Image (cartoon, coloured by chain):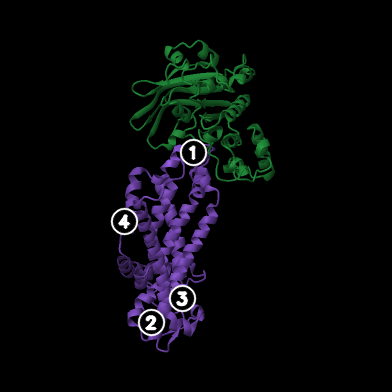
Amino acid sequence: MAGDSPLRTPPKVAAPVVRPRARGAAAGAVSTDVRIRAEHVSVSYGDRRAIEDVTIDIHDRAVTAIIGPSGCGKSTLLRAFNRMNDLIPSARSTGRVEMDGVDVLGRNIDIVRLRRRVGMVFQKPNAFPMSIYENIAYGPRQHGQKRRARLDEIVESTLRRAALWDDVDDRLGASAVGLSGGQQQRLCIARALAVEPHVLLMDEPCSALDPIATLKIEDLMRDLARELTIVIVTHNMQQAARVSDYTAFMLAGEERIGRLVEFGLTDVLYTTPSDARTEEYITGRFG
Amino acid sequence: MQLTEMRPDFERADGVLAGVEPREWLFRGIVGGAALFVFVVIIAMIYELTRQAWPAIDAFGLGFLTSTTWNPPSEQFGAAPFIIGTLVTSSLALVLGTIIGVGSSLFLVEVAPRCVRLPVSYTVELLAAIPSVVYGLWGVFVLGPWIQHTAGPFIVRWFGWLPWVEGPALGVGVFEAVLILTIMILPTIVAISRDVIGAVPRSQREGILALGATRWEMVRIAVLPYARSGILGAAILGLARAIGETLAVALVIGNSTQVPDSIFSPAYTMASVIANQFREAENDMHVAALIYIGLLLLIITLLVNAGARLLVWRVTKGQITTVIE
């Protein structure tokens, strides 16, 4: 795969949907409103600096892909947006991540409310070992929605938005763990949507899925981008080309510190990259 | 598919491949023998206890379990005070030990920074290395007087309205035994539940936190359900130790053959009555009755273990393992 350029030889499964379907709605009408403004963000784990001086604008109602080879710090950047790095005791962040007028890296940020506003979907589907219904109802209930009828509505509407309703509507009480990997991942997306986030962060959401399930998730991302802001980390350049409006390319040099190399409209970055390293990466000469 | 279907020439090798390597037999023999040995010991124990307890079994039958009279000179024996003493002390210790043990495990895994975690873990594990006679002496000289003069009066004053809370505290009794047993089973519960809580996959914790859950919600929704079977196992090991503990309990429980009517009453457990009276048994029937108690203790232990296994099996049935993949 590394030797293929995404534009010259798209993989077989992806070919029919590559550009027209995925970009049709967005082409020409890509949002330019900024939802998240990251300025000079650096993150260190103990003595080791993971990313340095990343400045990037995440646009509203658009899909932004962060691509780059392993170890370039793309997940670290993503996890700075909802303070997931806080879970690692030695992690330290500097710089600003501005969202809705506040710096979310700041000291007196309510992390619980931040994470409600900025949902996240992980690499491996991590459905909770409880029923499908409870997986989704848990979040809204925790945030104060106690009415059963309203919860039923939320469960149905989010499952529909995640394109999972038709698969599971007859067994909402069954354990979520019995679902297939792709279904579990869509359940995780539905679960994230149930708390009505403004931003959805996706950390290699398809890396554990087969190509069919991957396509379903990608379609879903395009649909969701009409209403919310999506940031996806992926090691799959074709995927980034298929789903994203904007692409950020990150790279770690000799000293293994991740930096942002290039950021721009996906169409532009993939066709006329301004940095030689970007071109080398997307044409598969390394990574 | 048969080997010979893939490689017909293997057929000719039958003479070489047939049979089992001698060292394989040796290995099977050794481990099989070891497993058989354990089995034989249990059977032999039950047989021998039954045989020696037979005079008492013959005389008192199952009424032995419910009779509260323990009068060696008149050869009247009933084990109810000891059975009740054992069940009450070990189940209360189990409840207290599980609450404290799981709480401190959660602290160690979820809250404590690394510089606190290791010293505290080692200290808790060190508790397991203290001989039980030391616990008993500590109970007699430190815990007992404290309960008698400080904790006991306080509890009777403020919680005297509860059933089975009546004074005065004597410095020996059920309450002291429960506290000693709680401390003794803590290292077991903490060591195991700390490991199973630590083994909850990070993806589960992150998943719930990313939904905007607090730490406590994370523990309740993602951590405890996942670690449930392991924590149950830890509690059961603790219970087994509490039921069988002899010396420390014998020193602090007060050695009364009456059924306790308060947590401050002196009482007796099955293990401690055997330890205390066996060598000073007044007649053959006394000896047989004590052995009968020993047999019952063995049966209760086996039942607790079987029940616990059943519980773990029912709790974990078909949900936990599939998540781990």
Q: Are marks 4 and 1 on the same chain?
A: yes
The Cα atoms of the two marked residues, 1 and 2, are separated by 60 Å
Task: Give the CA separation, mark 3 to mark 1.
Answer: 50 Å
Q: Of the residues shown, which amino acid type is indicated by label 3? A: Pro
Residue at x 43% of width, y 87% of height: B75
Residue B183 visible in the current orientation: no
**Alpha-carbon span between mark 2 and mark 3:** 24 Å
What is the number of the mark on residue B66?
A: none
Q: Is residue A171 left or right of residue B176?
A: right
Q: Residue at x 48, y 75 (%)?
A: B261
Q: Which residue is mark 2?
A: B287
For disc 1, the marked residue is B206
- Label 1 marks a residue whose chain is B
Identity of the residue drawn at 36% across and 86% down? B282
For marks 3 and 1, give the one nearer the viewer.
1
Say which chain tag 2 marks.
B
Q: Is residue A201 visible?
A: yes
Q: Residues within 10 Å of mark 1 (few under 14, many from 20)?
A: many
Q: Residue A211 sits in which quadrant?
A: top right
Measured as percent of width and height from the top left, residue A1 is found at 48, 21
Q: Amino acid at mark 1?
A: Glu
Judging by the rendered image, the residue that carries numbered circle 4 is B126
Q: Return the x and y of residue B20 as percentages of the image width and height.
A: 39, 50
